[in-house]
Image: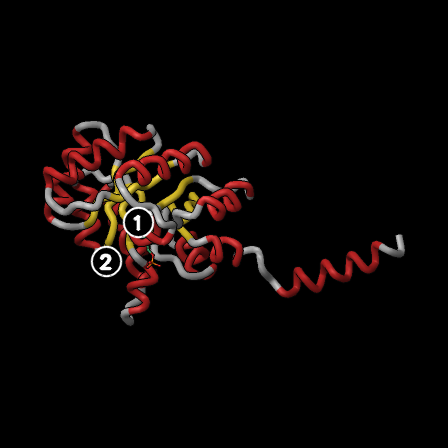
Amino acid sequence: MKFFIDTGNLAQIKEANDLGILDGVTTNPTLMAKEGIKGEEAIAQHYKAICEMVDGDISAEVLSTDFATIVEEGKKLAAIHPNIVVKVPMIKDGVKAIKWFTDNGIRTNCTLIFSAGQAILAAKAGASYVSPFIGRIDDSGWDGMELIGQLRHIFDVQNYKTEILAASIRNALHIIKAAELGADVCTCPLSSILGLLKHPLTDIGLAQFLEDAKKM
Ligand code: G3P
């Protein structure tokens, strides 16, 4: 399973990248706004900085919702760097735009996926990735991981090449479950990635080793 970090924060991206386990970055308008990135030029510069830092796919989300503008915006985003993947919302014009991008050699990540039907449509249109929002499904009282399992089964049976990108990850258990169920990618906040490191027995064991090392 590939690891992406889900943030627009350059310091956090650097920290995850320095671990040597990072395969890419996903952003969304909320995450970009959080970093105070405003205006077309600043947005492009920020994506460029991320692409120069991380050698992997970088999802950059369109801000429009009609076919013609999504295509224009996506073309500009894709021109920033060859690793840019245009993130498109799961709406009717979005599906149409994903098909256009596919036919024109631009890779896409279909975002805001909450059902198998939506994922099938995105895959049929040729999306490179679909992003089911695990945490938000859990928040509404459903089991987000069930969707990952269902998509894995459907994509295997149908031989879809689209990668399943588990998004809206909230904790280390989400990452472990996504790996177990065969997600191709997991995009996580830095806190969830670092959460994988933790085990109290590791801390106790290391403290003991360091204590005994003094006797050596
Ligand atoms: O980037 C999309 C997704 O990962 C957002 O997560 O935590 O806002 O539901 P969250």
Q: Residue at x 63, y 65 (%)?
A: 200
Q: Residue at x 19, y 48 (%)?
A: 120
Tell me the kind of residue under disc 2.
Phe
Quarter holding the N terminus is top left
In the image, which disc is placed on residue 188? none
In this picture, is 203 found above or below 34?
below
In the depicted view, which residue is nearer to us: 161 or 6?
A: 6
In the depicted view, which residue is nearer to us: 117 or 34?
A: 34
Label 2 secondary element: loop
Quarter of the image for residue 199 reads bottom right
Mark closest to the chain's N terminus, 1 or 2: 1
In the image, which disc is placed on residue 114? 2
Mark 1–mark 2 distance (CA, rounded to whole Å): 16 Å
Q: Is mark 2 within 8 Å of ligand 1?
A: no
In this picture, is 201 found above or below 111?
below
Q: Residues within 10 Å of mark 2 (few under 14, many from 20)?
A: some
In the depicted view, which residue is nearer to us: 124 or 83?
A: 83
Work out which residue is located at the far right of the displayed protein and give it: 215
In the depicted view, which residue is nearer to us: 28 or 95?
A: 28
Q: Is residue 161 visible?
A: no
Q: Position of residue 143 (x, y in %)?
A: 31, 66
Q: Residue at x 23, y 32 (%)?
A: 76
Q: Is mark 1 within 8 Å of ligand 1?
A: yes
Q: Residue at x 19, y 33 (%)?
A: 101
For residue 157, side relative to residue 66 (left or right): right
Q: Position of residue 201 (x, y in %)?
A: 66, 64
Mark 1 touches mark 2? (CB < 8 Å): no
Tell me the kind of residue under disc 1.
Asn
In the image, which disc is placed on residue 28? 1
Ligand 1: which quarter? bottom left
Q: Nearer the viewer, mark 1 or mark 2?
A: 1
